[in-house]
Image: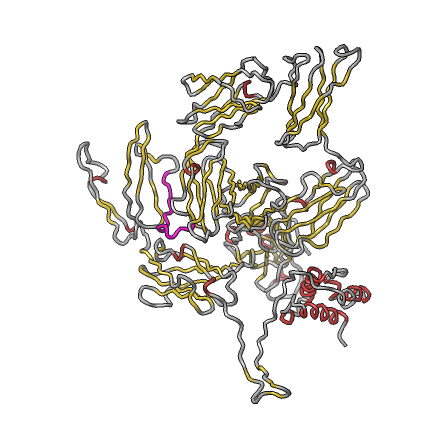
């Protein structure tokens, strides 16, 4: 009879199979029962509404509680398939097909057939990389390209390289699966000349295959020689021609490009050159015979720009001002846009904001914070578009300051002034727009001092709001427009029985305000009295409060703001900390924990929710333990790599710093994350990545209120990901991401006395440093010449550093093998001579008892040291 768990899995698979949720269950690995049960039970939970009242690990256990299983199975008969369930047809591959008519088989039925799996579509495969560039590759130097097969279906990848002589076996190549439907082909050409690279998928050429690649002669500067009078140590005189010749035959390609230099005056020179072929160029700039700062410059010149999918234009690609957005437009040339990306290189980090208009164009803005020249890269499908990078000269900000621009303090019919400082802003035209709350313009007198500064004066004649807009070169200066509000709350300047007002700005705090106005005793009577007022709500989340002082004297104006707080609990007093909330991440599969402290926060229970970047369960073994001392211990084990958010609430309200974001990544690999703006309203999205290096950002609008973002760090360290919406940081921003080094066992080092000498039976120690080698498993084996393994203990002392202790059992030759990720580290295996536990060189034995012949009488043992082991 079948066992209970066999019946259970059969029933689950049967339901899933009949409903098309798991049509391939028959191909599942029978040696992975827990994984199989989890997949089937998750499908039943998601699409049949059958909750997992029993764990997958329990249901495959022969000793499972039968009542629990029957309770779970009893839900299936009434289960109904949910709408939009991902039903998948089962592909059949029969070897016989039966044909029959009314009541009988047709002659020769069943027929033998051969039904193979559908071959993939090579038209959906594409390849790119430096190894496919028409020029720029040289002989005897490895190069590579990547093949992308996502969405192409089933098929094998093959690459054939034909050299200039028509041979297919002279170029050694390595084809490796990088994961995510990406394959990398690395090859090393040995001959110069044209090569044809055939890339095939499912036995057919992919688009643009074969690729024509011209391999240049290997560059060998040692083959160059120079001679002539101009190179002799002595003999050259002033006003004589000093010439020499350079012989470069056999040294490969290394020709110089002509550079035009034009003196623009005032110590500025304009230089330009016109590269004729792609590849790496070295630009040497000297002044007075000495190289300038950062010279020589390395410039990678690419192929001539081909068909362009997008174009970019606008003032932000040429100029801008510190503290203001530099704007430009990117628009599609045809129907296909491709994947867009932007990066800004310059004196400061610059926040980038992209607003997709939905018509094949987008508005792009970036905010430089320091003056200077910025390189604006506009990237389409991983390549700079034509004329990218664009060089934008960012001018220093114009400063405007003074009492005439302050929100309060200006008095009706009393002159006031402010200053505009444009001495560092370059050429531009100053323009000021001034208007009061009733829409009437008012005059501002501008006096130029001649040193790039201006003094501006005006006299308000109405006790209402005045708005002043200041532009330089048609660009708003920082903080413009300036709003100068009414005098209703000034300490002096108000008159009895004259209406006045003041403004309360709640645009960044909500609208829960209360107002109170009282006059001092003696104003309207012997006691303090309330004054009537009117509150007018404006469209910009501000309130205008109007009142009329009934007499001279002192008035007290109270403006109160307070969010409604549930008196039974206060989540703001809760804190959470511990290794399980480490911003640099936790290890997948290893249990971790953190503690929630609720003392003084009221009566409520904490709740914790985990959100992973990928589909499926984020954690397992999740548990909240009440320590009965106003603290809770939260235990869990992470199941997925990538970013994870942990939301902690107390009485339904988020605690400070929640949600906690655990981030990380690896050098050279995309670090993806998703931004969900559904329900956030209108606003632009801004992204910057700050860290040890510039990181290119790619942002893809998914069309459903979410954006898929990816950046590629090229150096290890901590990165700050700034995410802004409507020019404000979203909760948790800036996010901290710990980027780990890429896996490279060659960067593992081992050192310590235990690698130089050891004694039998005594502990020996050394240290292994893997901090620059990425994440992998460290294995150490120490074996004697007779095959006996020494006892080895590996202890992690810090992130990426390990202390190793071993005890050899015997003296003699031992071999130490250290592997990281299954690969031997540099200088290992290493041979070590283990010494005996006692030094016998100082022991002498003599006497007739040890003579070759004769009777045993006695002998003497004399030692130089006092230690002797029996």
Q: Position of residue 84 (x, y in %)?
A: 64, 60
* Closer-to-camera residue (860/209): 209
Q: Exactly how many numbered labels are in the figure?
A: 0
* Closer-to-camera residue (104/228): 104
Q: Position of residue 408 (x, y in %)?
A: 60, 20
User: Does residue 56 lie above or below 374 as drawn?
Assistant: below
Q: Position of residue 853 (x, y in %)?
A: 60, 66
Picture residue at 59% right of the left edge, 83% below the top:
98
User: Does residue 611 lie above or below 154 as drawn?
Assistant: above
Which quadrant would the N terminus be assigned to in this image?
bottom right
* Closer-to-camera residue (161/240): 161
Q: Quadrant of residue 447?
A: top left
Dominant SS in magenta: loop
Which quadrant would the C terminus be assigned to in this image?
bottom right
Describe residue 574's horizontal placement relative to residue 67 as left or right. Answer: left
Q: Position of residue 41 (x, y in %)?
A: 70, 63
Describe residue 60's horizontal placement relative to residue 685 as left or right. Answer: right
Taking the image as drawn, is residue 757 in sight? Answer: yes
Q: Is residue 296 one of those drawn in magenta?
A: yes
Q: Is residue 226 one of those drawn in magenta?
A: no
Picture residue at 64% right of the left edge, 24% below the top:
503
Q: Which residues are magenta?
A: 295-309
């Amino acid at each position: 009879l079948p066992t209970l768990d066999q019946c259970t899995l059969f029933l689950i698979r049967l339901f899933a199979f009949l409903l098309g949720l798991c049509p391939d269950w028959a191909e599942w690995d029978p040696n992975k029962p827990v994984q199989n049960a989890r997949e089937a039970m998750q499908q039943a939970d998601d699409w049949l509404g059958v909750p997992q009242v029993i764990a997958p690990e329990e249901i495959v256990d022969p000793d499972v509680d039968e009542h629990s299983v029957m309770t779970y199975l009893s839900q299936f008969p009434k289960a109904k398939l949910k709408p939009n369930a991902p039903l998948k047809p089962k592909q059949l591959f029969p070897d016989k097909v039966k044909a029959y008519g009314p009541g009988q088989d047709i002659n020769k039925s069943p027929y033998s057939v051969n039904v193979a799996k559908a071959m993939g579509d090579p038209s959906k495969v594409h390849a790119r990389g430096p190894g496919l560039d028409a020029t720029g590759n040289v002989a005897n130097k490895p190069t590579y390209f990547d093949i992308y097969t996502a969405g192409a279906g089933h098929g094998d990848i093959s690459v054939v390289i034909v050299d200039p002589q028509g041979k297919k076996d002279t170029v050694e190549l390595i084809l490796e699966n990088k994961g995510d439907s990406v394959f990398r082909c690395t090859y090393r050409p040995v001959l110069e000349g044209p090569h044809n690279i055939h890339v095939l998928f499912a036995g057919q050429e992919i688009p643009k295959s074969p690729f024509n690649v011209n391999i240049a002669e290997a560059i060998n500067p040692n083959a160059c020689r120079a001679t002539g009078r101009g190179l002799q140590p002595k003999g050259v005189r002033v006003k004589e021609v000093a010439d020499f010749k350079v012989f470069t035959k056999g040294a490969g390609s290394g020709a110089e490009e002509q550079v035009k230099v034009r003196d623009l005056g005032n110590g500025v020179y304009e230089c330009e050159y016109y590269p004729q072929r792609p590849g790496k160029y070295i630009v040497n700039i000297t002044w007075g015979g000495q190289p300038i700062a950062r010279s020589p410059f390395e410039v990678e010149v690419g192929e001539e720009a081909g068909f362009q999918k997008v174009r970019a234009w606008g003032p932000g690609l040429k100029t801008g001002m510190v503290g203001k957005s530099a704007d430009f437009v990117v628009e599609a040339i045809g129907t296909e846009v491709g994947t867009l990306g932007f990066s800004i290189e310059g004196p400061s980090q610059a926040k980038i904001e992209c607003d997709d208009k939905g018509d094949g164009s987008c508005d792009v803005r970036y905010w430089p914070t320091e003056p200077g020249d910025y390189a604006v890269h506009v990237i389409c499908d991983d390549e700079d578009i034509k004329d990218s990078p664009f060089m934008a000269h960012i001018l220093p900000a114009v400063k405007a300051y003074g009492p005439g621009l302050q929100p309060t303090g200006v008095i009706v019919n009393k002159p006031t002034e402010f200053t505009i400082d444009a001495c560092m802003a370059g050429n531009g035209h100053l323009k000021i727009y001034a208007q009061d709350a009733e829409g009437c313009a008012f005059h501002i007198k501008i006096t130029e001092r001649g040193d790039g500064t201006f003094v501006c004066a005006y006299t308000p004649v109405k006790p209402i709001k005045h708005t002043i807009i200041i532009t330089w070169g048609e660009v708003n200066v920082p903080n413009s427009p300036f709003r100068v509000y009414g005098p209703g709350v000034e300490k002096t300047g108000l008159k009895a029985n004259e209406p006045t007002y003041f403004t309360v700005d709640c645009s960044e705090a909500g609208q829960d305000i209360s107002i109170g106005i009282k006059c001092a005793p003696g104003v309207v009577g012997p006691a303090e009295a309330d004054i009537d007022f009117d509150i007018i709500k404006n469209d910009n989340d501000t309130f205008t409060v109007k009142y009329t002082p009934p007499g001279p004297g002192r008035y007290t104006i109270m403006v109160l703001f307070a969010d409604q707080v549930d008196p039974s609990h206060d989540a703001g007093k809760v804190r959470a900390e511990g290794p399980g909330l480490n911003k640099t991440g936790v290890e997948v599969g290893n249990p971790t924990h953190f503690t929630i402290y609720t003392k003084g926060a009221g009566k409520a229970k904490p709740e914790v929710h985990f959100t992973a970047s990928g589909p499926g369960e984020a954690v397992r073994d999740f548990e909240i333990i009440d320590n009965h001392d106003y603290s809770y211990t939260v235990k869990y084990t992470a199941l997925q790599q990538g970013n994870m958010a942990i939301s902690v609430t107390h009485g339904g309200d988020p605690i400070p710093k929640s949600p906690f974001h655990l981030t990380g990544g690896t050098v050279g690999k995309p670090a993806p994350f998703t931004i969900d703006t559904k329900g956030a309203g209108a606003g632009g999205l801004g992204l910057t990545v700050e860290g040890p290096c510039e990181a290119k950002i790619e942002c893809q609008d998914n069309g459903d209120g979410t954006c898929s973002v990816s950046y590629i760090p090229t150096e290890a360290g901590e990165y700050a990901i700034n995410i802004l919406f409507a020019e404000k940081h979203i909760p948790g921003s800036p996010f901290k991401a710990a980027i780990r080094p890429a896996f490279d066992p060659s960067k593992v080092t081992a050192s310590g006395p235990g690698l130089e000498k050891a004694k039998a039976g005594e502990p020996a120690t050394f240290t292994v440093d893997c901090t620059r080698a990425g994440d992998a498993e460290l294995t150490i084996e120490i074996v004697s010449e007779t095959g006996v393994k020494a006892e080895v203990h590996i202890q992690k002392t810090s992130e990426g550093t390990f202390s190793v202790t071993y005890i050899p059992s015997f003296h003699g030759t031992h071999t130490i093998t250290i592997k990281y990720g299954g690969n031997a580290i540099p200088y290992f295996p290493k041979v070590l001579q283990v010494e005996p536990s006692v030094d016998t060189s100082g022991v002498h034995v003599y006497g007739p008892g040890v003579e070759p012949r004769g009777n045993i009488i006695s002998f003497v043992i004399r030692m130089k040291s006092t230690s002797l082991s029996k």
